[in-house]
Image (cartoon, rainbow, N blue to C red):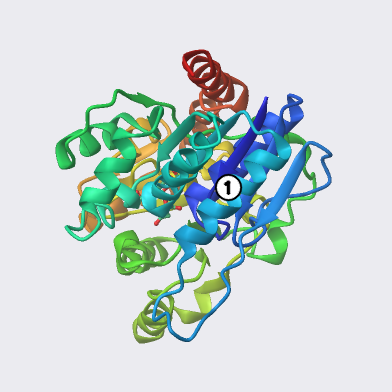
Amino acid sequence: MKIAIVCYPTFGGSGVVATELGIALAKLNHEVHFITYKQPVRLDLLNPNIHFHEVNVPTYPLFHYQPYELALSSKLVDTIKKYKIDLLHVHYAIPHAYAGYMAKKMLEEESIYVPMVTTLHGTDITLVGNHPRYKPAVTFSINNSDIVTSVSQSLKEDTLRLFEIRKDIQVVPNFIDVSHQKTSFTDCQRDVMAEPEERIVTHISNFRAVKRISDVVDIFYNIQKEMPTKLLMVGEGPERKPAEQKCKELGIRDKVIFFGNSNEIDKILCFSDLFLLPSERESFGLAALEAMVNKAPVISSDAGGIPEVNKHGVSGYLSSVGNVKEMSENAIKILENDDILEIFKQNAYKEAKKFDVNEIVPKYIALYEGALAMS
Ligand code: GMT
């Protein structure tokens, strides 16, 4: 199949999932065309089946807002025609499903029919998409997609609750390449990060308010009172500076390392003993899955789709949003005993394997085949 993928190219779960999906499809000999405004951060163009087409938005002083959707739909039309694309898969409803729909309609004028699969990722539904200013357009573009998928059962339920949806929504969970984790590198250099007796706790996100970064710092503060520990904070976003300030005020700044955005999260997760994800909302929690495949148990909130990934008492523990006390106690329970930590580490890995790329990508391929058969 020739598949066009539209996604956000930046650090963030939806772009990562779209990129990993494209890479997996290319390995299965499908021809994959990424169409977005920048090369996706995790995209390696060395595979001959992978192509990247940049969407350029020429700036014009008359426009207060530059029309990205227009440029994207035009680029889609041109690319689909030029490369004879069979199917369009857009990740994140806003504005990709809307632009994809417009491209489909323009192509129909020329008797070219391309089915569109839309994958809902989370904030496109629960935060941004639900805003009254976007809601009609988001509802319209979901209802006019040929196939709609969501990354968790929880997100499917949120979508049906928040929007008037006529379409069936298929749950296709996010995934991870377990074999890559095993083979990508062997030198886990724990000693550059911490002393042998120190535990390593990690948080990775885009440092937005929804991630409750302040809870991460509070939980870590409680842990480090009980045992020698380091906190690794990976990512960039508006809550980073306030978090650094809070660490200073609590007198723990020297125990916390802020990395900024990183392309080497496997290297950081390989020596992590525990992962913290106390988010206010989370449709899936891809970062938790990436931690689990690296054998890091997860202390998380029970928001959204997290319970579908992190299993309470098995791969970690779940608490209600904001229950820092319970999250701290559970973290300490896992970290204070080597044997217990080892059990949780193995369990986390075992649970992560359920989301292996080889289990999940065939589900997308089956949906693509169904969409093509319908068109
Ligand atoms: O977490 C974010 O704010 C980034 C966002 C995105 O669109 O990149 O993540 C969403 O999609 C991820 C991939 O499907 C999910 O793992 C995240 O849980 C989801 N974030 C939220 O729902 C807040």
- Specify the amino acid type for callout 1: Leu
Q: Callout 1: few (<14), some (14-19), or many (20+) C-alpha neighbours within 10 Å?
A: many
Q: Quadrant of residue 263?
A: bottom right
Can you say whether 82 is above or below 146 in the image? below
Q: Could you tell whether 180 is left or right of 170 in the image?
A: right
State the image coordinates of residue 2 (x, y, percent, origin top left).
Answer: 68, 30
The location of residue 266, given as percent across then percent down, is 65, 50
User: What residue lies at 51% left-to-right and 81% top-to-bottom?
Assistant: 60
Residue 337 in percent (x, y) is at 46, 43
Mark yes or no: residue 303 visible.
no
For the N terminus, the quadrant is: top right
Apparent side of residue 289 relative to residue 221 in the rendered image (left or right): right
Q: Looking at the image, is 38 positioned above or below residue 304?
A: below
Q: Which residue is mark 1?
A: 76
Q: Residue 243: give x, y in percent of width and height.
A: 39, 76
The residue lying toward the viewer, choosing from 120 and 110, is 110
Query: Would you say 349 lies left or right of 22 here?
Result: left
